[in-house]
Structure formats: C-alpha cells, structure tokens
Image: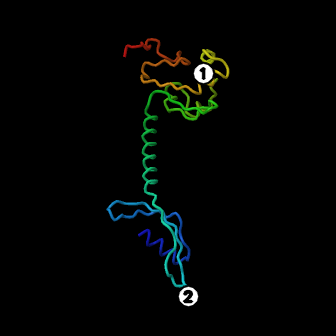
C-alpha cells in the first residue's frame, strides 16, 4: 500500500521521491530492504511512460542498525542497574559519562558529576599520590578501574562514606 500511494502521488504531483525504504521479498524467500530514488518520466503529450531511478540494497545496514540499537539497549539496562560507579573521560580528563549509581554512592547527579573537574572529584591526597602534575594526569587518562565486588569496595577518595564495620579483606571472597 505505501508503494502504491508513493507512485500515485508521484504521478499526480509530477515529481519523484528519494530515500524511500521498502521491504521486498526475494526469490529465495528472504526479505531485502531497498532504498529507492526515482522520478516519473512523461512523453511529449504529458502521458506517463515510466520511472527512472535506482534502488540500493540497504539490508545489511538496517540489520547493523538494529543490532546497534539492541546493544545500546542492553548497555543502558546494565549501566542503569549496576551499583558500581563507571565513568568515561576524554583525553582532557573531562567526564563524558558516569553511571546513575553515582547518586547512590556519592550523592551527585550524573550531570553534577560530569561538570566536576578531576581536582573536584579526587581528594588532594589522591591527587598527590605517586605522580605529580602532568605525569599524574597522563597516567590517569591511560587508566581504568573495575570493581567486581561493589559490596566490599572502599573508594579511596570517599572512605569517610564507607561503613567502618564493613571493610574489604583481600583473598577472602
């Protein structure tokens, strides 16, 4: 029905279409998604004699886009339900993403945390550990941290927020 409507409108308005996507059944029984671009062709008397255009098979692109949407859905579900804080920062150490758990663990909204500088996110003690100045920030940019056991984790910058009766014991499960 959509194709018939498109063709009828194209003839009536005497203009073509572009980027029209339709699903067609292939001879082997599978389906293909084709993107169509065409214009009606009229003879000297104004009678329709056909269409001129091209269709492009975009089946793989459509499948890839659907797989990406599904992956993003799973990723979003995972990050929204996790209790660990995971963040992403750019090469200038600006936080570009942080999981919603930052509110529960540290009391900041995602937006508030992403507006903070590294110096605002870390304690002065943590900033001074091991490396200084640019060396510290370069090392931090190349680093990652994964906590597989948030129930026993103590964030070095926020130890005061941790229950003093509940500390991690290395190699004790």
Residue 1: % across, % down: 41, 70
Q: Nearer the viewer, residue 132 or 81?
A: 132
Q: Residues within 10 Å of mark 1 (few under 14, many from 20)?
A: some
Secondary structure type for disc 1: loop
Q: Residue farthest to the front?
A: 28
Residue 156: % across, % down: 54, 17
The quadrant the C terminus occupies is: top left
Residue 126: % across, % down: 59, 17
Q: Residue farthest to the bottom?
A: 45
Mark 2 — residue? 45
- Where on the picture, by quarter, is residue 28? bottom left
Residue 122 numbered mark, or none: 1
Q: Nearer the viewer, residue 41 or 12?
A: 41
Please identify, in this view, whether the residue under mark 2 or under mark 1 is nearer the observer: 2
Q: Residue farthest to the left?
A: 29
Residue under the point 45% across and 46% down: 68
Q: In terms of sequence position, does the residue under pointer 2 or pointer 1 come before the other?
A: 2
């Amino acid at each position: 029905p959509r194709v018939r409507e498109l063709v009828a409108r194209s003839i009536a308005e005497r203009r073509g279409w572009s980027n029209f996507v339709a699903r067609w059944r292939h001879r082997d029984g599978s389906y293909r998604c084709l993107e169509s671009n065409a214009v009606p062709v009229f003879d000297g008397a104004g009678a329709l004699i056909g269409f001129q255009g091209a269709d492009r098979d975009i089946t793989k692109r459509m499948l890839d886009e659907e797989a990406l949407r599904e992956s993003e859905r799973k990723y979003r579900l995972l990050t929204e339900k996790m209790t660990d804080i995971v963040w992403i920062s750019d090469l200038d150490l600006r936080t570009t993403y942080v999981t919603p758990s930052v509110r529960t663990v540290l009391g900041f909204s995602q937006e508030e945390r992403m507006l903070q500088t590294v110096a605002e996110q870390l304690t002065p003690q943590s900033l001074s550990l091991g490396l200084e100045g640019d060396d510290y920030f370069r090392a931090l940019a190349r680093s990652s941290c994964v906590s597989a056991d948030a129930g026993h984790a103590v964030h070095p910058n926020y130890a005061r927020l941790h229950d003093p009766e509940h500390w991690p014991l290395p190699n004790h499960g």
